[in-house]
Amino acid sequence: MEAENKNLLMGGAKTFGIDLDGNAIELFDLYLKELLKWNQKINLTAIRSEKGIVLKHFLDSLSVGPHLPKHFSVLDVGSGAGFPGIPLKIIQPTREMTLIDSVRKKVDFQRHVIRMLGLKRIETIHGRVQDKAILQRLGGQFDIILSRAFSDLRTLLLLSFPFLKEGGLVIAMKSEGEGRDILLFTEREGARYRLQKTVSLMLPSSSFKRTLLFFEKI
């Protein structure tokens, strides 16, 4: 990782209250190199520059970190090349993390990176949360369901419900302006969720704005 991008990663993480030690920086560096290498053969991400990956994948993933309790179990739905689940696992190795994605090649990449980084207590699953076998296996197991991939918040909330423990949270990572109509949905689905809070932020060294929506299962 170029020094400029390493400083961007460290400084950006610090704005979220996250201090990256030397080991974490090394793991992010390995992750970055493998992502760039695999991306030459497999379309894992449309972002192909070091700086773009550091900013729009690593730091974007870390933006939710301060809002996650350390010891809660997390399901990352539609994790793609491992975002935000793997970066969050790097900064909090003891957290139970499960990643699910419907694209086999992306899951293969996740498993490769997890082995290379030596991460433990993290599982990757090829499939969809709609799959009956996955629901039977994982239903009611998670404290938090996290996603930045779902464009349809209503679908995300409906599909997440049976995987959550009582009082669990769905955290939807949305770009600015998305989800304005979700209040109407939560009003209709009042027996299922309560909109706990929203957090608006801007990624460091950029104009990209992110909104985090927190829905509590009730």
Image (spheres, rainbow, N blue to C red):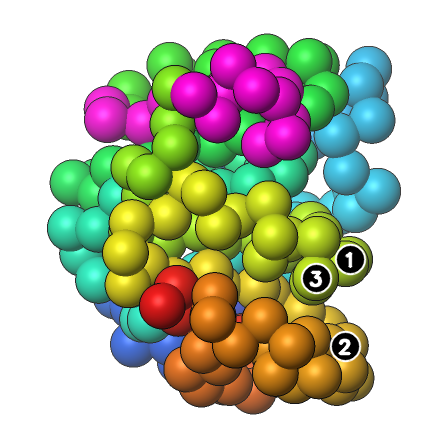
Residue for badge 3: 154
Q: Position of residue 175 (x, y in %)?
A: 72, 73
Q: Earlier in the sequence, mark 2 or mark 1?
A: 1
Relative depth, front residue between 146 and 93: 146
- Tally of marks: 3
Q: Position of residue 188 (x, y in %)?
A: 65, 77
Measure the alpha-carbon separation of dots 1 and 3.
Answer: 9 Å
Residue at the spot 69% in from the left edge and 24% down from the top edge: 102
Residue for badge 1: 151
Measure the alpha-carbon separation of dots 2 and 1.
Answer: 9 Å
The answer to whether the residues at label 2 and label 3 have Cβ atoms under 8 Å apart is: no
Q: Is-magenta flag for residue 190? A: no
Relative depth, front residue between 152 and 38: 152
Q: Say which amino acid is labelled 1.
A: Ser
Residue 178 disc label:
2
In this view, 179 is above or below 59: below
Q: Earlier in the sequence, mark 2 or mark 3?
A: 3
Q: Say which amino acid is labelled 2.
A: Glu
Measure the alpha-carbon separation of dots 2 and 3.
Answer: 12 Å
Residue 120 disc label:
none
Find the magenta span and give its range. Answer: 120-136
